[in-house]
Image (cartoon, rainbow, N blue to C red):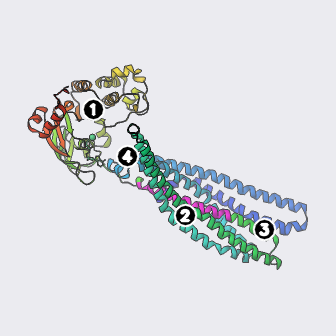
Amino acid sequence: MRKLLSYLARCKGRMFAGFVLKIAGSVAELFLPLIMAHMIDDVVPTRSVLALSLWSAGMFLVAVIAWAGNVVANRFASKVARDTTERLRADLFSKTLGLSARQTDEATLPSLVSRLSTDTYNVHTMLGMVQRMGVRAPILLIGGVALTFTVDPVLALVLLVTVPFLALVSAFVAKKGVGLYTRLQESMDKMVRKVRDDHTGIRVIKALSKTDRESRSFAAVNDEIVRNETRASVITGVTNPVMTAVLNIGMTAVIFIGAYRVAADRVQVGDLLAFTSFFTVMLNAVIAVGRIFVEISRGSASARRIAAVLDLPPELLPEEGEPDESGAYIRFDGVTFSYRGAPALENISFSIKKGESLGIIGATGSGKSTLVSLLLRFYDPDCGAVYIGGKDVRSYGKEELSKKFGVVFQNDFLMAASVRENIDFERGLADEEVERAAEYARAEKFIAAHEGFGGMLTARGSNFSGGQKQRLLIARALAASPEILVLDDSSSALDYKTDALLRKTLFENLPDTTVVLIAQRISSVRFADHILVLDGGKMVGFGTDEELMRSCDEYRRIYRSQHGEGGEEDA
Ligand code: ADP
Ligand code: MG
C-alpha cells in the first residue's frame, strides 16, 4: 500500500483537482433535497409563479453543478488510475526481467504472469473506484446525516443510530476480504501455471490422448478458483443487502416517528420528503461504500503481491573478486552449488585455454546445464569461484559478461519474425554477419529453400523442423562473434552427419572462440580438446577422448551404451 501511494504521488495535482471537484459536486448534490423542501414548504404556499420559477432555475443550476463536478472528476480519476497502473505494470515488467534466476525460481513464472495481468488489473479497478466513490460516498453519507439534523434533529437521531452498524459491517468486510482475495489470486496463479504447462506440452498431451485427463485437472483448478471466488463474494456480497437492510429499518422508523411529528405539527411535509430524498442519497452512498471495501480488499491483496516482487532486493550485483593467475581462460575452482537442498554440482575444478573446446557429457540431471548457468552467472556458487579471462565472473558487469557469450539453451525460443530477425535478435548486425553465421551453422541451404532470409517463421518456429530450428539458434548464437559459444544439447535434433559437419565448421572457422558443448552423445564431444564427465553433480572425468577411454569408467559406460550394437553410430 505504501508502495502504491508513492506511485500515486506522481499524479498529485490531478488527484487534488479531482478531489476538489468531487467535493463541490457532492456538496451541491446534498443541497438538492434542502432546496426541494424549501420549495414545497415555503415557496409553493405563496403561490408566486415568479418565485417558484426562480427557485426551480436555482435547483436546476445546482443539479448541473453536481453532475458536472462529478463527471469531470471521474474523468480525472480514470486518467490517474490508468497512468498509475501503466507505470506500475511497466516497472513490474522490467523488474520481472531483471530478477535473478533464483528469485524467478522462488516466485515462479506463472505467479509473475498473473501479478502482471490480473493483479495490476485489480489495482487499476481499486484506484478508479476509490477516487470515484471514496470521496463522494463519505461526503454524501456524513453530509446527509448532518443536513438531516438541520431539518429535524429527532428524526436525524433515529437515522444516526444505524451508522455504527454500517461501520461494523464495512470493517468486517475489509478485514476478511484481503485474506480471501489473496487466496483467490493464488488459485489464479495455479490456473496460469496449468495453462502454460498444457500449451507447452500440447503435442505430447494430444499424442498420448491425455486431453481428457488435462481437461479434468484443469476443471479441478478451475473449481478451486470458483470455491475461493464464492467464499470471497459471499462475504462481500452480503454487505450490500445487510447495509441496505440496516438503513431501511432506520428509514421505516423515521417515517413512523415522522408521521406522528407531522400530525403533531412539529415537522412539515416537505421536510419529511427531504428526508426520503436524503435517504436515497445515503442509501446509494452506503452501497458505494460497500463496493469500495470490496475493491479495496481485492486491490490491496493484489497491491501486496505486486509490491512483494517490486521489493525484491537486487541480486548478483558485481562484487570484488580475487583475480586468477593461472593463465586459463575459463576456470572452475572448487565450485559447489545447490538450488535448494542437495548440491547439483560438487567441488568442480577444471580449466581450459582460450580458443579451446570443452565437451560436457553426463546423464540427464547430472548438472550439465547447471554448470553453464554458473558460467553465465545466472547463479552464484555456494563455494568456490568461476573465472573467465583471469577475472572472477562476480566482478564483471552484467552487460560486459553477457556480451562475451553466444548461447543456445535447451528448448530455446524462436520468434514469429523473419529468419534474419531471428538471427540478428535486435543487435543490428550487418547482413554479411548474419549470412556468415547461417553458413557456419550449416543453415544456408534450408534457409534458401525457405524463401531466404526474409522468410517468416510462425510462432515458436513451428514451420521449421527441429534440426532446422537448432541450426537457426546456433546461427543466432554465432552471429555476434562471441568469445565463448555455449551449446546446451543443441545437436541432439541433428542427424549424425549434419552434427559432425557442424562441429567441423565451428572448430575450423572459429579458432579464437572458446566452445562449450553439452551433449548426450559421445560422438558430439569426442573431438573436443577437453571432455568433462559429470555424474550426479560430481566430476568423474576430465581429459581427451583417448584419456577418458583409458581411465574413466563412466565415460566407457556411456560409450558402450551408445556403441553397443556394433558402433554403427560413428560420425
Ligand atoms: P542436466 O543439464 O545435466 O540434465 P541440470 O543441470 O539441468 O542437469 O540439473 C541438475 C540437477 O539440478 C537436477 O537434479 C535438477 O532437478 C536440478 N535443477 C535444475 N534446475 C533447477 C532449478 N531451477 N531449481 C531447482 N532444481 C533444479
Ligand atoms: Mg540440461
Q: Quadrant of residue 533?
A: top left
Q: Residue at x 55, y 60 (%)?
A: 233
Under tag 2, what secondary structure? helix
Question: Within 10 angstroms of label 2, few (less than 14), some, or many (20 or more) residues?
Answer: some
Task: Find out whether the residues at labels 3 and 4 contact each other: C-beta distance under 8 Å.
Answer: no
Q: Which numbered disc covers residue 492?
A: 1
- 304 within the magenta span: yes
How far apart, in angstroms, are the residues tagged by discs 3 and 1?
84 Å
Disc 2 and disc 4 in contact, CB within 8 angstroms: no
Q: CA distance from mark 1 to mark 4?
A: 31 Å
The relative height of residue 40 versus residue 200 in the rendered view (above or below) is: below
Residue 314 at x, y percent in the picture: 35, 51
Q: Amino acid at mark 4?
A: Gly
Q: Nearer the viewer, residue 453 or 480?
A: 453
Q: Which tag, 1 or 4, sits closer to the chain's start?
A: 4
State which tag comes first along the sequence, 3 or 2: 2
Q: Which residue is mark 3?
A: 273
Mark 1 or mark 4, whichever is nearer to me: 1
Q: Crowding at label 1, few (<14), some or many (≥20) Cα neighbours within 10 Å?
A: some
**Magenta region, residue range:** 283-308
State the residue position of label 2.
235
Q: Position of residue 507 (x, y in %)?
A: 21, 27
Which SS class for mark 1?
loop
Nearest-to-viewer mark from 2 and 4: 2
Mark 3 or mark 4: whose residue is earlier in sequence = 4
The residue lying toward the viewer, choosing from 67 and 441, is 441
Q: Is residue 326 visible?
A: no
Whether ligand 1 has any atom under 8 Å from the Cβ at mark 3 is answered as no
Q: Which residue is under mark 4?
A: 98
